[in-house]
Image: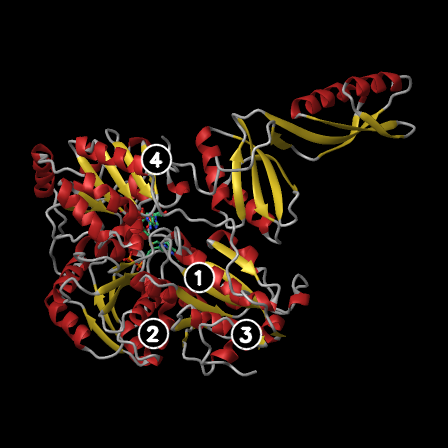
Amino acid sequence: MKHLISALVENEPGVLAHVAGMFAARGYNIDSLVVGRTEDPAVSRLTLVAKGEDAIIQQIRKQLDKLVHVLKVRDHADEDIVERDLMLISVQTPPGRRAEIVDLVELFRGKVVDIGARHMMIELTGPEKKIEAFINLCRPYGISSLARTGVIAMPRTPQPDGPTEEKSGTTNSD
Amino acid sequence: MNPDPTASIESSSSATLTGAQLFHRALLNQGVEVMFGYPGGAALPLFDVLHDSPIRFVLVRHEQGAAHMADGYARASGRPGVVLVTSGPGATNLVTGLATAHFDSVPVVAFTGQVKSHLIGNDAFQEADVTGITRPVTKHNALCRDASAVARMVNEAFFVATTGRPGPVLVDLPVDLMNQPVTPGPGHERPRLRGYKPRRHAHQGQIAKAAAAINAAERPVLYVGGGVIISGASELVRQLAERGNIPVTTTLLGLGAVDETSPLALRMLGMHGTAYANYAVQESDCLVAIGARFDDRVTGDVTKFAPKAAIIHIDIDPASISKSVNVDLPVVGDARDALEHMLPLIERRPRQAWFARIEQWKRQHPLKYGHGEAIKPQAVIEQLGRLTDHDALITTGVGQHQMWAAQFYGWRRPRQMITSGGLGTMGFGLPAAIGAQFACPGRLVVDIDGDSSFQMTMSELATAVACDLPVKVVLLNNNFQGMVRQWQQLFYDRRYSASRMVNPNFAALADAFGATGLRIDRPDQVGDGLNELLTTEGPAVLEVLVDAEENVYPMVPSGHGLDEMDLGSLA
Ligand SMILES: Cc1cc2nc3c(=O)[nH]c(=O)nc-3n(C[C@H](O)[C@H](O)[C@H](O)COP(=O)(O)OP(=O)(O)OC[C@H]3O[C@@H](n4cnc5c(N)ncnc54)[C@H](O)[C@@H]3O)c2cc1C
Ligand SMILES: Cc1ncc(C[n+]2csc(CCOP(=O)(O)OP(=O)(O)O)c2C)c(N)n1
């Protein structure tokens, strides 16, 4: 099952190396990993998407939690969240089919951000599923390049990031 | 640069000091008495402040030795062991030692010199990405980027290394910052670790459930690991076992947590554990793991492990829970804290049928060995146990001799057995013995070693001689990497590929180092040989030529359940 996990980490040099190294060493499969600043300049938010059995996801969470620079970890699996991925995609525009593609962009509420003689660049945000649907629809025209930020997410009713996942807090299951 | 041997506990906020002086002050405030290491260019400012420091600096012969000494010091005393080495090769030589400590949860604090800050990343002379290289083998590490942060980083390192699940922490110190005079602000030495909150107190509800499950069990077993020794919970484990009338088995790293003369003791479990411990675990209906981590050397095939048992797991590290074996009832917290709360809830049960079965297994399958023309290594260890009243501090290398030490010494108290369990590092024995001797100057420290393991770090004999340390080595020489040979015999049709050793004359070698070398090769010499070793002053090595093709039994072959042991000569 796909899990979206977010963590608040100290915004210090080397933190990403600790996180990435831990994932590599333990062989966890990560679909995407995004790090960005938060409202607090000393804290960054890390969002990752991982697939795996519950036991593996549990381990990922706990191992992340163990890193000294990680402040809080939260698994959004059973939460009502807003998730967004941002994509830039450059699609080839065969003669006479540009309008078709522009329609598609509008349907998906994307934005054309650059137009050339034989291609156009489109910006699109949304949940992963929407992004992937758009990519599939673009394939027949030919995709010349594509970049995605990876998913960031937030629960719908903003809650403070604790106490559900306070550091090392949740392993006693009762 | 003036070192400051009289540095006081007070904060030094107003004074101007170099980074190295701040470092030194912080070490003194941490109560550091001894450090192990080796100098080099990038560490010279640090060595300069140590020149007339009250901290004793032990010069080793290889940085790996320094890490193992700090490790042995920590395991023997419970206090953190401290290492200081230079950049580049000095730091990379630490890796095996850090990994060894990390695997077995030992508090070691390592400081490495680093090239000048502005040269970092430029392939400067003797530069290595030390925080990068050691990240997976430390609990935490950090590179210093600001001289006024040195004291804080030292304090953080000690705090992280010694709390929660202990482990090694490394701090990389660029040489320019150590020479730089700074006037740090008030509170500069205070740790700032918002994300680090080790959990100590276990959940009361979980403790009560665990106690109820134990009380209701007909065939409970306590499975006690290194965490019990780390937490200082051995006495509470004894009380739990006696109060509830529950048999106890220990892991390799838990040896000594329970006095093996107790009728409740099942001794070690696992691949080379006793048959009765392994049978008891497989038959148990309630397995209580305390500070143990279900290592695959303990469980055998995990799908066949303790199939009839509800598993309770008391551990301070949430990530240890359900990592390899699914746990029914986790209790996350310090073992001592959890047991203190659990004890009053434990009720005595007779469990006569259970103990009758265990007695039968004990009678049917005791640990034993044969006798012959050649010296049996087990006999040497058994006799060493008797001659030392089972009270020596024992360190080991890795291999058959390590397993025989575990099986035959006869463990009585915690922190007595100092051995590399998780990483299984050959060469650990001698430097660990040196570290242990520094921690416990008045005690007898004996390294039970193998000929191959010993040769990996034997240059540290020079350290023992230079420091006039009375460490003793019982070198069980089978002229093989015995454990490898055993596997090749059993699983590779006796094809002894690269496992036969052509060895030096160990006794002469010990003499050449300035230690005392002794040698025996007949069974009737064992008692006298050991006595002579133990009464020799200063460092001494007794080479014992042993039966070359003796095997360790019982043995659980890989992929088998614990009850599918090869009893070999015990059958
Ligand atoms: C050649 C060879 C053969 C071996 N054969 C065997 C064998 O037959 N049997 C055997 O047992 N081992 C054997 N080992 C050792 C084995 O590899 C493991 O190192 C060992 O079993 C681990 O012991 P442990 O479970 O006690 O864990 P440790 O590594 O000691 O882990 C300690 C556990 O306690 C927890 N802990 C730490 N502090 C606390 C605290 N304050 N409170 C509560 N919990 C805490 C930690 O989180 C961790 O989970 C062998 C090793 C070698 C090299
Ligand atoms: C550094 C290192 N290299 C290789 C091994 C693999 N290994 C495990 S036991 C062993 C043989 C040890 O031989 P010896 O020290 O003579 O002890 P014995 O088994 O003969 O008692 C080897 C090579 C190891 N554990 N550590």
Q: Chain of mark 2?
A: B
Horizontal and vertical percent position of residue B263: 10, 47
Give the amino acid at mark 1: Phe
User: Which of label 1 and label 4 is nearer to you?
Assistant: 1
Q: Residue at x 22, y 70 (%)?
A: B444
Residue designated by label 1? B158
Q: CA distance from mark 2 to mark 4?
A: 42 Å
Q: Count residues near mark 1 (Cα–Cα under 10 Å), then give few for <14, some for 14-19, many for 20+.
A: many
Horizontal and vertical percent position of residue B267: 18, 48
Residue designated by label 3? B20
Q: Count residues near mark 3 (Cα–Cα under 10 Å), then give few for <14, some for 14-19, many for 20+.
A: many
Give the amino acid at mark 4: Val
Q: CA distance from mark 2 to mark 1?
A: 29 Å
Q: Earlier in the sequence, mark 3 or mark 1?
A: 3
Give the amino acid at mark 3: Ala
Judge left or right: residue B374 versus residue A153.
Answer: left
Residue designated by label 4? B325
Residue designated by label 2? B461
Is mark 1 in CB contact (under 8 Å) with mark 4?
no
Tag 3 secondary structure: helix
Q: Earlier in the sequence, mark 1 or mark 4?
A: 1
* Relative height, residue B373 to residue B178 (above, below): above
Is mark 2 in CB contact (under 8 Å) with mark 1?
no
Is mark 3 in CB contact (under 8 Å) with mark 4?
no
Q: CA distance from mark 3 to mark 2?
A: 31 Å
Q: In which image quadrant can residue A39 be found?
A: top right
- Is residue B567 something that shows in the picture? no
Horizontal and vertical percent position of residue B228: 28, 50
